Amino acid sequence: MRRLLAIATVFILGGTPAHAGRVVVEVVDTSGHPVADAVVSLAPRPGTPARTIAPATHYVDQKDETFLPFVTAMHVGDSVIFRNSDTTRHHVYSFSDMVKFETMLAPGESSPALVMKGPGNAAVGCNIHDQMLTYLYVTKDPEIATTDAQGRASIDGVVAGDYVAHAWHPQLRPGVILPIQGVTVNESIPATVRFNLALLPDPRGAMDREHLGY
């Protein structure tokens, strides 16, 4: 009884479970080049307990008329705050189905926290500087990671068991079925997930309205 209670306490507190492993992620395009800013999440199959994740606050900065980071991966219940570290104002907005908002930010200002109430993805832009673009990706899956410039990421502390791995990237063709693959995690050997994605060209442009009297 005490042993069962101890195991339950680990999951309630959101700590690393006693039987946990590591998942190594690699994402490339159809030419074999590494893909940065790809999101890979792990959904536990029936019989595999999900790790409890406490809500977190994420920050998207605006610096040199660029959103940083380009992609922010979040769980349902997380929140995001937009900060303006530029010397010019920004008009941050999204008309995506997942979340609709707009806020004007003067230099040095931050937006109110925006809570993600459901899964999906949203493109966020600046209505003054059209080249500025960032994406929010929100999932119910407990495990999530975003690839670096080498197309790699790792997820530690994953509860041992069977999962379905999903991959997403903002340059995937609209309406495409998200790539998935099965993965088994154990505590002795890191599991590997590798995705090959067919991507559209980078959507970030190079024009703005700042000098048009907006």
Image (cartoon, rainbow, N blue to C red):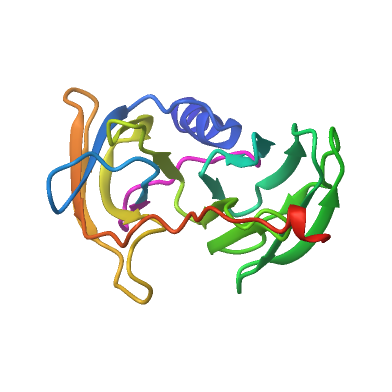
Q: Is residue 214 a member of the stretch shown in magenta?
A: no
The answer to whether 159 is drawn above or below residue 6 in the figure is below
Residue positioned 64% across, 34% down in the render:
64
Spot occupied by residue 136 in the image (x, y as percentages of width and height):
56, 53
Give the magenta range.
43-55
Please give the name of the residue rendered at 51% of the width and 35% of the height, measured from the top-left corner: 11
Percent coordinates x, y for residue 35 in the rendering: 28, 43
State the residue at coordinates (14%, 54%): 30
Residue pushed farthest left? 31
Dominant secondary structure of the magenta stretch?
A: loop
Q: Is residue 24 left or right of residue 14?
A: left
Q: Nearer the viewer, residue 91 or 5?
A: 91
171 left or right of 130?
A: left
Q: Quadrant of the C terminus?
A: bottom right
**Is 193 rendered above or below residue 24?**
below
Q: Quadrant of residue 24?
A: top left
- Relative to 210, 37 lies left or right: left
Residue 53 covered by magenta stretch: yes
Q: Which quadrant of the structure image shows residue 126?
A: bottom right
The answer to whether 71 appears left or right of 213 in the picture is: left
